[in-house]
Every structure is written in structure tokens, then in C-alpha cells.
Image: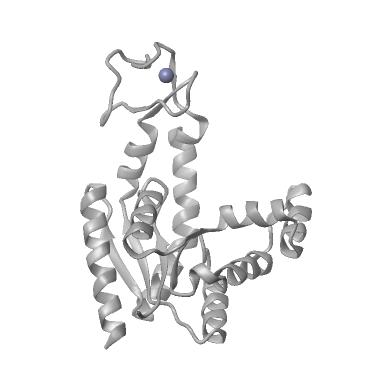
Amino acid sequence: MPELNLILLGPPGAGKGTQADRLREDFGLPHISTGDILRAQVAEGTELGSEAKRYMDAGELVPDEVIVGMIIDRIGEGDARDGFLLDGFPRNEAQADALAEALAGLDRKLTAALLIDVPDEEVVRRLAGRRVCVKNPTHIYHVDFDPPKHEGICDQDGSRLIQREDDKEDVIRRRLEVYHAQTEPLIGYYDRSGALRRFDGRRSADEVHAHIRATVATLRMEEDL
Ligand SMILES: [Zn+2]
């Protein structure tokens, strides 16, 4: 079986986590997110993890080369030998170059960069409409898509529903600005190399999934020829 070395791109609220879970089931690919790796390596106290911790303890951003080192270690592990799904990495062209170089060193290459495209206004509508139960944060509603029976009240336990700080519109718009500034150059980068595949993220999660799965299956067939 040819490898499936994939990158997942898309704004917050695009449903990347959901799609990553489904692709893992479809193709047995480990879902590698920068945040998870960072937490795991810090917890295990690896060399890179300890280095990252020093920056985080000082309230500083973990530098690119530390993150890149962690990701490259991770994609060399056994469960990622037949492929992987990267989420949250690369974040810029320098990281994309470092990834390409590391893959080439392992005699591998990127199969595709999958972009789940969602317009900003749709992202704001999805995220700013979320309401969470103050008593149990797994009780989640949406003012348009999944409203509670009584406005502002949790159906399950009658507690108050709140909008989390992260879901406030101005916070979402700032995240979108950062996303566009970081990701648009990457979209261009992968478009030029022919690796980019776009998916309409305004569709339902099931439709997006069906489209991505078909595309990835085709890519694998092509690699096999
Ligand atoms: Zn509740």
C-alpha cells in the first residue's frame, strides 16, 4: 500500500477534528496535532519536551525548530510509517520546507494538503452561536442549529448557558485574522506544488467526509500506479 502523508488545513470551526477522526477510521492514519505532541513530549520529559517547557514556563512561544523537531520525530514512529494526518503543522512556509526536507530524508513525500474551506462569516456564525452549560461543559448548544428548549437554560439539568470567552465574536475574528495571515501563504505554497485539494466546508460534516474520503482513495490509487 502506498503511503498517505497528509496535511489538514482550515479555519477554526471548519470541523478539522471531526474529519481527522473519520480519516483515521477510514485509512488507519494517526492524527498528529502539534498541541498533542507538545503536551506528550513535555509530560514524558524528552529532550525536546524539556526545551519546549523552558520556553513555555518563561511565557514565550516555542520556537519553530523545536516544534519541527518534535513533528519529525513523531512521523518517524512505527504507526506513522504508512502515513499520517498532520493538523496544526506546518504553520508557515519555513515549517513547510522543513517538513518537505525531513520527508525527503526519510525517502518519503507529502501526498496532499487537504483544505476545508469555510467563509469567515460562516465560521463566526458557527462559533459565536455556541452556548455551554455552566455546570457541565459537555452540554453544548447552538442558538441556530441546536437551540435549547428554553433560551439560556440547559435542557439536561436546568443550569444557565453561557458563551465562552473563546466563542466571543471579537475573539473569533482575531483568530481568523491570524489564520489568514499564516495560512494563505501556505495555501499558495501547496497550490503551486500541486498538492492542494480544496473541500467546501459549508457542506455537512457527512458530505465533506464523503468528498475527502473519495479524494484520498483516488490519490492512493494514483500513487499505486
Ligand atoms: Zn447542563
- Position of residue 164 relative to residue 68, above or below, is above
Residue sitting at x 73%, y 50% = 56
186 to the left or right of 14: right
Name the quadrant of the C terminus.
bottom left
**In x, y percent, where is residue 96?**
52, 73
Question: Between residues 68 and 221, which one lies in front from this camera angle?
Answer: 221
Residue sitting at x 49%, y 70% = 80
- Position of residue 199 relative to residue 80, above or below, is above
How many circles with numbers are drawn on the protein? 0
91 to the left or right of 3: right
- Position of residue 132 relative to residue 82, above or below, is above
> Hey, which quadrant is residue 34 in on the image?
bottom right
**In x, y percent, where is residue 220?**
30, 77
**In x, y percent, where is residue 72?**
59, 72
120 to the left or right of 42: left
**In x, y percent, where is residue 221?**
25, 79
Residue sitting at x 77%, y 60% = 51
Residue sitting at x 41%, y 62% = 8
**The image quadrant in which ligand 1 is located:** top left
Name the quadrant of the N terminus.
bottom left
> Hey, which quadrant is residue 84 in on the image?
bottom left
> Hey, which quadrant is residue 85 in on the image?
bottom left
138 to the left or right of 1: right
Q: How is colour applied across the structure in the image?
A: one colour
